[in-house]
Amino acid sequence: MRGSPAPGKMGKLKAIATENRKATNLLAMLLGMGAVAVLSLWGLDRALPPNLTRLDHISAVVEGQNGQPLRMFSTEGGILRLQTRVDGVDAKYLRFLKSYEDRRFDSHWGVDPAALIRASWQWLCAGHIVSGGSTLTMQVARLLEPRDRTLVAKGIEILRALQLEWHYSKTDILNMYVTLAPFGGRIEGVRSAANVYFRKDPAHLTIAEAALLTVLPQSPSTLRPDRFPARARAARQKVLERLLGQKVITQADYDEAIAEPLPDRQFPVPMLAPHLAERLVAAYPGQDRITSTIEPWLQADIQKLVEYYGGRNMPQRSVALMVVENKTGKVRAHLGSRDYLDRASHGFVDMTQAVRSPGSTLKPFIYALSFEAHQTHPQTLIWDRAIADGGYRPANFDHGEAGEVSIADALRFSLNIPAVKVLERFGPIRFSETMRHNGLDLRLPHDGDVPNLAIALGGTGIRLDEMTQLYRALATDRKNCPLTYLQGETTQPCASRQELFSRQTQNWITGILQHTPRPAGYRAQAARSGGQGAVPIAFKTGTSYGYRDAWAFGYNADYTVGVWVGRASGEPVNGQTGLNSAAPLLFSVFEKLPPLSRSLPAASANDWQNPAPVGLKYFGVKHADPVLVAANALDIEFPADDSVFMASSLGPRGLVLRARNGERPLVWMVNGVPLPSDPWQRNVRWQPEEPGFYDITVLDKNGVARHRQVTIRANAPLVSPIRQISLTSSSTK
């Protein structure tokens, strides 16, 4: 039939069609298999994502304000694994790492076929593994999921490497490597290794250091420079030779690096402000990098100072210390104990947080509130004589009595009796509540106790950080604002807090404390010209009952320093006082502090030496006007309040009572009973009938009354023990 193909041609067409069908079927099968493979890989990827669990277990680091580590904490497994990123590592290390370990890292997809072929050929020729052919990505896969070195493990590493490259960028993969790479013992990560071997962060490495860190992960247990220096030196040289051959470094670089000595030890991790670091890590769980306000150089200097000072002068005692920057409230140095690792002295106990008796260190605030209430003035005269009311009877540190002294001198010399009298006039409950409203809780020995006069001498509990904060308020804006421990942290609104007292009262207290007698060897410091010594230091010491706690708090224009010395166990230390134990350390710390803005005048308060107003010239004028007593107001000139007389010294004529000012006629009364006297005379004689306590009152024409309390003792002095109150201190220095 015309138009029909020849039989031979038909056969050829059929054969071609058959071949096409076979090719199509094969292609479809291959595509199907490929699709199945892709779907399978996709399913496996979804079912078995990269295991990044090890990256979740990172060592916490507390840093100083400049980023220098203060303390590094191991992971739960005891590994020092610091979070590291490539932007914090010296660029030459990353360049050496790629050149030596994985030259095509930036271009491959996680596996380098050429490297695998080379490694396989070397294996066949040598009969053992010469090189693994692993890329950096494959090494990361192995670091994330460690396995024995087998062919199966190698296959899994290849698949995991492809998976990592699929999910993460090259920078992410390098970040994993520099965080997890092993460097011997418990050290993992480049930042950990740089700190342990070179005592620095890896941002600035020498060529020799970078080369050593490049090769160490190949065999971290046998190449450790502190244990196998010859092997480590040979491995480092091998890296340097390859880098020289690849022209990554010059001959001069090579010669210099070869000559650089190897580190011969693993340095201990830094242990600066260990107690504070521990507290911050506990307060911010999950954060691997916490930046504090601590100045590392100052912290290191102070720890050395305390170690030296404590070793010589107080080997069995602990020391706690804080340095606060006045302007910002930032804590620049923090020491919780003399030696954190000393178990004998309970060095692990943070004594800045321990509640202890403050001794006499609250006295400046008692007087300040008394000034503010116009009850006293720095030059008000007060009798330093034993209180004889049958109740609380404190004594001075030396068990003596100074007689009539000014309030300023009573504070300067830390006399106990005047402080108790002033607190009695102001009111211990009122004082305690004033402190509480301004952020300081005075802890009493027992729940339900009512604040009493013992507060003046340490009959309460306070922490070192609380008292340092309070003295910082005295040095600056008179507001008891929280201290700052974290860099960038802003103090919670302190503007709402009231000022404890006025600037005039602040100046008075500061002026008095600047003239407090100093410990031996530090008397001329404030008189030096220039330098830190030109700025007067206002300071106050205190010693708790039984010589258990020695305190010193001081401030100048720039810093406030608080020091505690004692035993963490609370055992007494015979003869220990704030003046002889804590104050020398306080002044030594000030010698190390740099000057700042000097925002406060160096001599801020000379007017504390001005005479007191007439109405406040003498302490004990009761029912006086709350501001000032008029110059012609009635007053009792003699006897002084709280005077004590021996019966034998009065003689047959008795005691002279003498008034001044006031409008006559005058009426004198003793214990409410009028005395027979001439109402137009200002003097009257009174003969006590027997020893005891007497209240003497004089009234003028206008009904103005003035009172004095006196004690008449029998011929033999009455001796009665001083009633001790829990936590009460009779020491003052």
Image: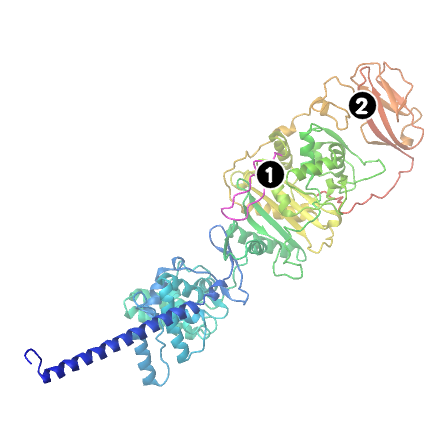
Say which label, 1 or 2, has the lower sequence index. Answer: 1
Q: Secondary structure at mark 2?
A: strand
Read off the residue under disc 1.
473
Q: Position of residue 347 (x, y in %)?
A: 64, 58
Q: How far apart in space, not on screen, are marks 1 and 2 (Cα)?
A: 37 Å
Task: Say above or below: 176 vs 712.
Answer: below
**Residue in front for this viewpoint, 311 or 439:** 439
Tell me if 669 is positioned left or right of 531 in this view: right
Quarter containing the C terminus: top right
Any mark on residue 706, and which? 2
Q: Position of residue 318 (x, y in %)?
A: 65, 55
> Which residue is most to the front?
1
Badge 2 local density, few (<14 within 10 Å), some, or many (20+)? many
Q: Position of residue 338 (x, y in %)?
A: 62, 55
Q: Position of residue 54 (x, y in %)?
A: 48, 66
Badge 1 local density, few (<14 within 10 Å), some, or many (20+)? many
- Residue pictured at 66% horizontal, 47% vertical: 463
Task: Say above or below: 241 vs 555.
Answer: below
The kind of residue tagged 1 is Ala
The answer to which quarter of the image holds residue 147 is bottom left
Q: Which residues are magenta?
A: 478-499
The kind of residue tagged 2 is Arg
**Residue in front for this viewpoint, 577 or 109:** 109
**Residue in front for this viewpoint, 119 or 69:** 119
